Image: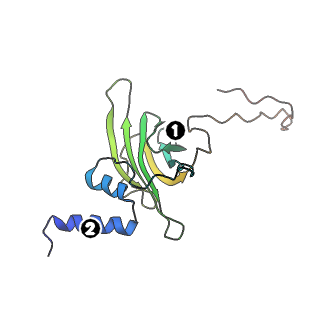
Amino acid sequence: MLRPGGACLALLALLAVLLNWPAAIRAQVDTGVAVESTDPAPASGDAPAEPMRAILQGLDKTTARVSTVEVPVGDIARFGTLEIVARACQKKPPTEPPESAAFLEITDVRPDSPAVRIFSGWMFASTPALSALEHPVYDIWVIDCRKGEAASPPADVEPEPLPVPDESGEIPEDSEAAPAD
């Protein structure tokens, strides 16, 4: 028979087993403290493991722009006034139902006031409303977890402007791009 508090621990243990999380992530969830990986170090001839990146999307509600943000685990990325730190990122293997989850710490940093932690917890790609960021200007949600280096430019890089058509509606081949506003 379980004690009243033991039911929650049993449920957490079952969830950890079902999701097949590594021991380091289970320890982080149970204690709330980030721990080093308990996986054995690669052999001297093996290459080190590729770093994980959390792939997020963010919505700026004032401009209605959606941007993709890539955050390497342990690094900081900025989206507007938000600083996003990915502490862990997990992805199910292809043989199991698709799921990606990231442990994020999001802080609102404004120049006129002290920094305020507005979110700390797991976000799941399949159910973004389960633990959503509540902010009046920004929405952030998890898309995926990937290994390796970033493949796309940072979210704050603006695309080059498109060329301007001439009076006939044709785009000259040697024309410069339209001047930025």
Q: Secondary structure at mark 2?
A: helix
- Residue that label 2 marks: 11
Residue 135 in the image, given as x and y percentages of width and height? 37, 42
* Residue shown at the point (47%, 34%) measured from the top left: 80
Residue 97 in the image, given as x and y percentages of width and height? 49, 69
Q: Quadrant of the N terminus?
A: bottom left
Image position of 84 with respect to 7: above or below:
above
Q: Which one is in front, 98 or 146?
A: 146
* Direction from residue 69 to residue 181 in the image, left or right: right
Callout 1 amino acid:
Thr
Residue 82 in the image, given as x and y percentages of width and height? 42, 36
Q: Quadrant of residue 118?
A: top left
* Direction from residue 13 to residue 65 in the image, left or right: right
Q: Between marks 2 and 1, how big is the CA–CA gap? A: 42 Å
Q: Secondary structure at mark 1?
A: loop
Q: Quadrant of the C terminus?
A: top right
* Direction from residue 130 to residue 57 in the image, left or right: right
Image position of 41 with respect to 77: above or below:
below
Q: How is the image coloured?
A: rainbow
Residue 168 in the image, given as x and y percentages of width and height? 86, 36
Badge 1 crowding class, 10 Å Cα cut-off, few under 14, some 14 to 19, many 20 or more, is: few
The mark nearer the N terminus, 2 or 1, is: 2
Are the residues at dot 2 and dot 1 in contact (C-beta closer than 8 Å)?
A: no
For the view shown, which residue lies furthest in the top direction? 112
Q: Which one is in front, 119 or 42?
A: 42
Badge 2 crowding class, 10 Å Cα cut-off, few under 14, some 14 to 19, many 20 or more, is: few
- Residue that label 1 marks: 63
Callout 2 amino acid:
Leu
In the rendered structure, find residue 180 and report the number of the disc placed on it.
none
Q: Which one is in front, 56 or 19?
A: 19
* Residue shown at the point (57%, 49%) measured from the top left: 47
